[in-house]
Amino acid sequence: MTGQGDNDLKNWIKDLTGQTPKNIALYHQAFSHSSASVKKSGTTISNERLEFLGDAILGAIVADYLFSIFPYKDEGFLTQLRSKIVNGQNLRELAIKFGFDVFLKATLNRDEKTKSSAFGDAFEAFIGALYLDLGYQRTRKFVITRVIKLHVDLDTLVNTNDDYKSQLQIYCQRNKAVLEYKVLSEVKVGNNKLYTIQVHINQVPYVTFESHSKRLAEQKAAQLTLEQLQVANG
């Protein structure tokens, strides 16, 4: 029997994707963050497997789309642009914009959700669920027509340098400052690790950020540190 929660989720998915889901259990799993995982018949149930699948499917769809609309660009350009679209920060912002917070099950407070990769992970898991439920072509249609075309500014991404670690390194070199990325913690969460990274400049701690990706945590911490320095310096 379908509960009210199932109906709410089904209606939300239909509004978001334009398609009616068939196997609603897949989407419930997609919104089960590892911090709120449960065991069923000895198996831990969380969205990590769907996240793994969704990451691959999303990457393939975006790569195929960029390949077709930029016929004269080389591999390096396409790889960099795809990375900008599917990076954890961008997926987190999309997930929040789409209202994933209403359905995400996680034992994290609001601040922890914002700083962690929970929303980005859920976005990838949702893509995995959509693929298993409705197939590649319908998933591709959703990603291209309702995500990229409506919410991704390709022109801005092409012309934006978002290598914040390099930018922060240049800033420190110009100011003869010593830059360090310190790993405050490295915790195993399910099958993944959660890294907490803190930026230090001349041994003074700045921004802390955490993610399942050490590289992403460093990039985000560098970005937020640059913003903090910009405000401090007027």
Image: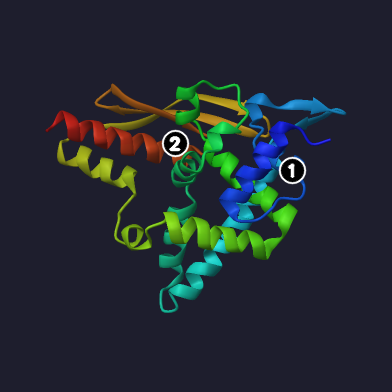
Q: What residue sits right under mark 2 in the picture?
A: 217
Give residue 196's position: percent from left, percent from top.
47, 27
- For residue 193, side relative to residue 94 (left or right): right
* Other-residue count near label 1 (Cα within 10 Å), few / some / many at <14 / 14–19 / ≥20: some
Q: Say which of marks 1 and 2 sits in front.
A: 1
Examine the rendered structure and indicate whether residue 76 appears above or below residue 231. below
* Other-residue count near label 2 (Cα within 10 Å), few / some / many at <14 / 14–19 / ≥20: many
At 41% from the left and 37% from the top, the residue drawn is: 218
> Tag 1, which secondary structure?
helix
Viewport quadrant of the N terminus: top right
Most foreground residue, 160 or 31: 31
Q: What residue sits right under mark 1 in the picture?
A: 24
At 45% from the left and 30% from the top, the residue drawn is: 114
User: What mark, if any, has residue 228 been given in the picture?
Assistant: none
At 48% from the left and 23% from the top, the residue drawn is: 110
Picture quadrant where residue 42 is located: top right
* Real-space CA distance between mark 1 and mark 2, rounded to the nearest whole angstrom: 32 Å
Viewport quadrant of the C terminus: top left
Give residue 163's position: percent from left, percent from top.
34, 49
Q: Residue furthest right?
A: 41
Most foreground residue, 18 or 180: 18
Disc 1 marks a residue whose amino acid type is Ile
Determine if residue 125 is in view.
no
Most foreground residue, 141 or 54: 141
Give residue 32's position: percent from left, percent from top.
67, 32
Q: Residue furthest left?
A: 234
Could you tell me how many numbered marks the image carries? 2
Disc 2 marks a residue whose amino acid type is Ala
**Colouring:** rainbow
At 77% from the left and 47% from the top, the residue drawn is: 23
